[in-house]
Amino acid sequence: MKLTFHCLGRCTTCKRAHAALLEDGHEVEYVDVRRDGVARAVLAEAIARLGADKVVNRRSLTWRKLTDEERAMDPVDLLKAYPTLMKRPLIIAGDHMSAGWSDEIRARLAELAAAG
């Protein structure tokens, strides 16, 4: 199954997830959020489908360094300005979209690949 994998090159979770996806036989289009950026439309869709709380990492060091004015920004504008605030990886596989990595996400992607 082909999927788009938005991540940060040095993120250990992203490295583990990428390796697992390749191991599971997925074709992975790798997008580094810092180097390549993320399209505004992709961010808007992720926030609309998953919710800002699932896409914006409010526990990160970057978040803690933001001013109150920056934290109050529109989530899409915030992620465009600070791409490392995005919960990673953001995975798009057909109609499926997920933020973060877990055994449940890996299993769901395997189910989607098996279905078709």
Image (spheres, rainbow, N blue to C red):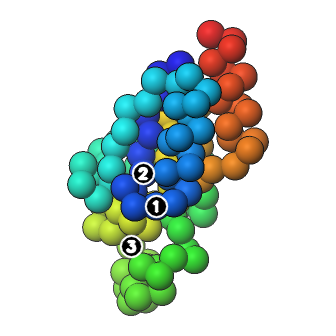
- Residue under label 2: 7
Q: What element carries label 3?
A: loop
Image mark for residue 73: 3
Residue 74 appears in the picture as rendered: no
> Nearest the camera: 41 or 85?
85
* Residue type, numbered disc 2: Cys
Name the residue rendered at 71%, 31% in the picture. 108
Horizontal and vertical percent for residue 25?
56, 22
> Nearest the camera: 97 or 105?
105
Name the residue rendered at 39%, 57% in the picture. 8
* Cα distance between the residues tagged 2 and 3: 22 Å
* Residue type, numbered disc 1: Cys
Question: For this view, does 83 lie left or right of residue 49?
Answer: left
Label 1 environment density (alpha carbons within 10 Å; few <14, some 14–19, many ≥20): few
* Cα distance between the residues tagged 3 and 1: 25 Å
> Nearest the camera: 64 or 24?
24
Horizontal and vertical percent for residue 56?
51, 64
Name the residue rendered at 53%, 24% in the picture. 26
- Of callouts 2 and 3, which one flags the residue occurring earlier in the amino acid sequence? 2
Question: For this view, does 81 lie left or right of residue 19?
Answer: left
- Of callouts 3 and 1, which one flags the residue occurring earlier in the amino acid sequence? 1
Image mark for residue 11: 1
Relative to 63, residue 78 above or below: above
